């Protein structure tokens, strides 16, 4: 099997799964209970919280666990919008976001908010001139993902924040960092709100995190515990400990891992460049873990299923898009055919050289077969 869909989800590392199982078996007491079993669980929870805070260089009071990035995005953007709407009802969103962000935008429009969408360049980077025009005195929040999930385009968040603050010093910057954390070095303190998901960093599904700058107040979307608690309920301790461990392992030797992935990326690009009709959509501003191409003359779903016969697994764009046209590629190149024929190859430091060879062999075989069918 050759799995090259790591941006959709990652396998759980054995040591992370071991931690999950151990906590499930030995720490099943509710961390909120006052008896000794509860205290034992609470101490483990505090230990996990401390590790997460240290790894991300934030305070323990500045984050809350969620079920994943989608829930965290909702809590961040809607929560901030409801709190600060008295200062304005304009929100700016980039055209390179995950589908969950656009779903939130549609909901906020129904509540009377105005959503402005920022253009990107042909290389997938925010158009700063357009950003300057769209951030006004009544813009309360800007959302720009750290790394685009379809092409891998990375945004210079520190510069984005500087541009925003020149226009409106009180404007909040949110970033979905799901595709960046554990892949490239990133400073979470460059933004006011950040979101991430455990299953993208070799942890279990069902756990994520919302970072909130200590100076911000978010209106809770869920209720049932102490006032102001953003995510009430019994802490899912096994998931939290597993997330903490996966985060630690993901950030270990990050530069070495990135270099391994970069070599794989370059090998694939060099090989696919031999095909004149294939377009490489990922630019120099894209992280090497995500390589987006357009087949142009072949339907992506047909090609994906052809590769699958060799147990080679890639995707067309984001898993949440389910084969629809790549909006990110469309916004970069303004080419419908290019956007409708995308293949996303997402790599990992766990990928083996032999898997790259097997992928390219399978690619060659099926591309030659399918390109002759008209």
Image (cartoon, helix red, strand yellow):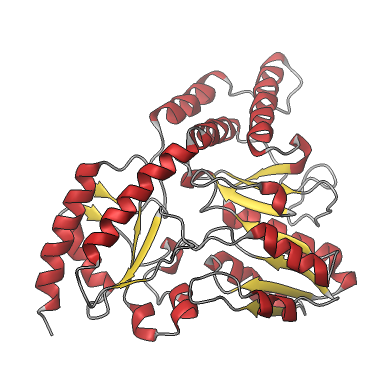
What is the x, y in percent for residue 265?
A: 33, 54
Q: Which of the 4 image quadrants contains residue 47?
A: top right
**Residue at x 33% of width, y 69% of height:** 293
Residue 11, placed above or below residue 69: above
Residue 320, placed above or below residue 354: below
**Residue at x 53% of width, y 60% of height:** 154
**Most distant residue in the top direction:** 36
What is the x, y in percent for residue 177?
A: 58, 53
Determine whether, in the image, residue 246 is placed left or right of residue 293. Answer: right
What is the x, y in percent for residue 274?
A: 19, 68
Q: Nearer the viewer, residue 236 or 4?
A: 4
**Residue at x 27% of width, y 54% of height:** 267
Q: Which of the 4 image quadrants contains residue 131?
A: bottom right
**Residue at x 76% of width, y 68% of height:** 164
Determine whether, in the image, residue 14 is placed left or right of residue 30. Answer: left
Q: Nearer the viewer, residue 42 or 307?
A: 307
What is the x, y in percent for residue 89?
A: 81, 76
Q: Nearer the viewer, residue 165 or 24?
A: 165
Res. 37 visible in picture: yes
- In what quadrant of the picture does the C terminus appear? bottom left
**Most distant residue in the right direction:** 86
């Amino acid at each position: 099997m050759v799995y090259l869909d790591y941006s959709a989800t990652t396998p759980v590392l054995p040591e992370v799964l071991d931690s999950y199982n151990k906590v499930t078996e030995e720490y099943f007491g509710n961390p909120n209970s006052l008896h000794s079993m509860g205290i034992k669980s609470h101490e483990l929870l505090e230990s996990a919280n401390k590790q997460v805070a240290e790894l991300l260089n934030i305070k323990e009071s500045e984050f809350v666990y969620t079920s994943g990035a989608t829930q965290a995005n909702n809590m961040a953007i809607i929560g901030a919008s409801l709190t600060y709407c008295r200062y304005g009802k304009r929100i700016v969103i980039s055209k390179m976001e995950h589908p969950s962000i656009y779903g939130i935008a549609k909901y906020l429009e129904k509540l009377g908010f105005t959503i402005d969408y920022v253009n990107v360049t042909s290389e997938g980077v925010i158009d700063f001139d357009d950003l300057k025009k769209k951030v006004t005195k009544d813009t309360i929040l800007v959302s720009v993902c750290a790394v685009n999930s379809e092409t891998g385009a990375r945004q210079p968040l520190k510069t984005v924040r500087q541009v925003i603050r020149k226009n409106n010093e009180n404007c909040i910057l949110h970033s979905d960092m799901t595709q960046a954390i554990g892949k490239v070095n990133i400073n979470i303190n460059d933004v006011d709100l950040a979101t991430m998901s455990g299953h993208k960093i070799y942890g279990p599904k069902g756990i994520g995190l919302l970072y909130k700058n200590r100076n911000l107040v978010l209106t809770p979307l869920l209720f049932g515990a102490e006032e102001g608690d953003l995510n009430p309920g019994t802490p899912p301790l096994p998931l939290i400990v597993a997330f903490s461990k996966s985060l630690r392992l993901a950030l270990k030797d990050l530069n070495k891992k990135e270099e391994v992935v970069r070599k794989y990326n370059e090998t694939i690009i060099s090989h696919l460049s031999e095909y004149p009709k294939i377009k490489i959509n990922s630019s120099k501003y894209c992280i090497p873990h995500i390589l987006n191409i357009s087949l142009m003359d072949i339907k992506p779903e047909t090609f994906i299923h052809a590769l699958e016969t060799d147990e080679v697994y890639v995707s067309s764009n984001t898993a949440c898009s389910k084969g629809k046209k790549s909006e990110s590629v469309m916004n970069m190149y303004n080419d419908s055919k290019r956007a409708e024929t995308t293949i996303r190859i997402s790599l990992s430091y766990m990928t083996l050289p032999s898997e790259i060879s097997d992928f390219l062999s399978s690619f060659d075989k099926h591309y030659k077969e399918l390109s002759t069918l008209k």
